[in-house]
Structure formats: structure tokens, C-alpha cells
Amino acid sequence: MWAILSGIEGNIKAYEAVLTDLKRQRVPVEELYILGDLVGVRPESEKVVQRVRYPRSGELQPQVCIGWWEEQCFNLHGLGTTAEATELLNRYGGDAVQLLWQSVSRETVQWLRGLDFGFFELDCLLIHGSSISVSDELTPQTPPWQVLDRLQRFGANNLFCGRSGRVFEYQLQGGSVTTSVTTLDVKQPVQTITVPQRRVIGVGNVGREPGQATYTLYNPNTDKVEFKTVFYGHKKGFSPT
């Protein structure tokens, strides 16, 4: 069984609640993936990073890839693709820029830079946004042609993503795609590509909503996906989503 998380966003209480819930599962969890947004504007972001880097005895070592908030850290420290955190500023304003600067140290940012962009296991792509970028947000409203494009770039049948923060299962039925190229000189032969059934799974968000964390369980042997909701704090408890 795989446990797939995203969007802890510096919420240490939410992460601890999910770890506790994982221990309750009837089928043991053998792999733990965190699909980005490990940090955020919360002051506990450093505690989350340390908790993930150094799990306790008997706990799984999480496999972590970069997310949107990590990319904002890179830009803020002049280590990213742009010299300024323009996307962060436009989306959340100047206060968020200041909070992120205060919440995540440069030493931690250097560690975050060493994380993978995503993971490809069996026929599954596990990534924060999509095969395009960490900012690419896939949702149940994303056009099918766009979903197919993101899947085909890595040849994945299952794409697990966390950018939207939502839990959902988006299925593309098997079929075929016919393509041809016409130039000024000649029309190329028509090509037909058979496309197997594929899907995108939104894995939820652990830390964004106070008192409630969502994540995903996946059994690679049965190909079954299960969405989980964990209540913590004053809302203690758990339930399938």
C-alpha cells in the first residue's frame, strides 16, 4: 500500500495526525510519498522539514518532491528560474512574501533544491502539478485533451497530483487518436494511436484547512484508490472521503 500526501504547508499538527492515521490501516503502508508543498508561510515549516527528514524509529522515510511553495522559496532566495517571487506576490501579496522568508531558512531551501521533480513508479507518475510544471493545476474540469497530453509525456496510466488540493479521480476511457500532418507539398499518412484507459488522481491537501487533512491510499496490486479524511484538534477522528 502507498500513502500519497501533498500540501502539508508547514502544518505540523496535520502531518502528525496523518502519520497516526497511517498506523491504523489494516493493510500496512509500505511507501510514503509527499508530492510537494512541504513548507508554507506557517512558522512551523522548519519543524515539518525536520520531521520529514528524520522520521522516528519504525516510521517510513518519506519520498518528497518539490511543489509550488518550494519553487517560491527558490525564487525568493534567487535560486529559481526567476530572480523575484512574482507569482507568490501576485497570488498572495507582500505579506506572504515576508512570511515565507521568515518561515523557511536558506539552509532548508538548499535542502529543498535537492528534491526530485516527481517520481515514476510502475505505471504511475507522482508529481505536484503535472509533467509540465509545479504550477500546472489539474482538476476534474481540465479538458480531456490536456489531461491526455500530461499523461502521455511520461507514458503514465496513473497520474497522482496535489496542486489543486482536492481529492478526485478523473478517468479517460480507452480509445484511439488519429493524427495526420499536411504541408504545402504533401499530406503525410494518417497515424492511429491506441490509448489505454488512464486517469488522474487528486491526492488532497494535508495542511491547508485547519482541523482537517485529506490524503490518498493506493494499492498497486489491485489498482484501487481510497481517499482519506483525518480530523485533528477539536475535530478528532477519521473517515473515508
Image (cartoon, rainbow, N blue to C red):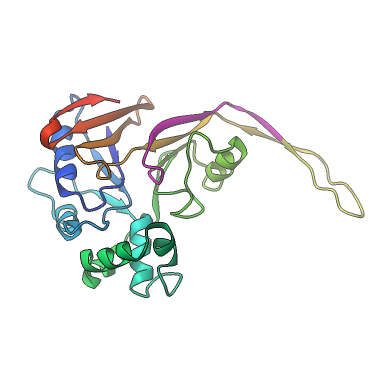
- Whether 167 is among the magenta residues is yes
Instruction: Locate residue 222, reporting x and y percent.
Output: 36, 24
User: Viewer-proximal residue, 157 or 230?
Assistant: 230
- The image quarter in which residue 219 lies: top left
Instruction: Locate residue 176, reporting x and y percent.
Output: 67, 30
Instruction: Locate residue 37, reporting x and y percent.
Output: 31, 52
* Left or right of 75, for residue 213: left
Instruction: Locate residue 122, reporting x and y percent.
Output: 41, 39
Above-or-below relation of 49 to 209: below
Across the whole image, how many numbered discs are drawn on residues? Answer: 0
User: Viewer-proximal residue, 221 or 116?
Assistant: 116
Which residue is painted at 57% across and 30% down in the image?
196
Give the magenta part as a residue range: 162-177
Which residue is painted at 37% across and 73% down in the image?
79
Which residue is painted at 21% across and 69% down in the image?
105
User: Viewer-proximal residue, 159 or 73?
Assistant: 73
Work out which residue is located at the far left of the displayed protein and give it: 57
- The image quarter in which residue 207 lies: top left
* Left or right of 48, for residue 167: right
- Whether 9 is among the magenta residues is no
Work out which residue is located at the far right of the displayed protein and give it: 185
Above-or-below relation of 7 to 228: below
**Image quadrant containing the N terminus:** top left
User: Can you see residue 114?
Assistant: no
Which residue is painted at 31% across and 41% down in the image?
205
User: Can you see residue 157?
Assistant: yes
**Image quadrant containing the C terminus:** top left
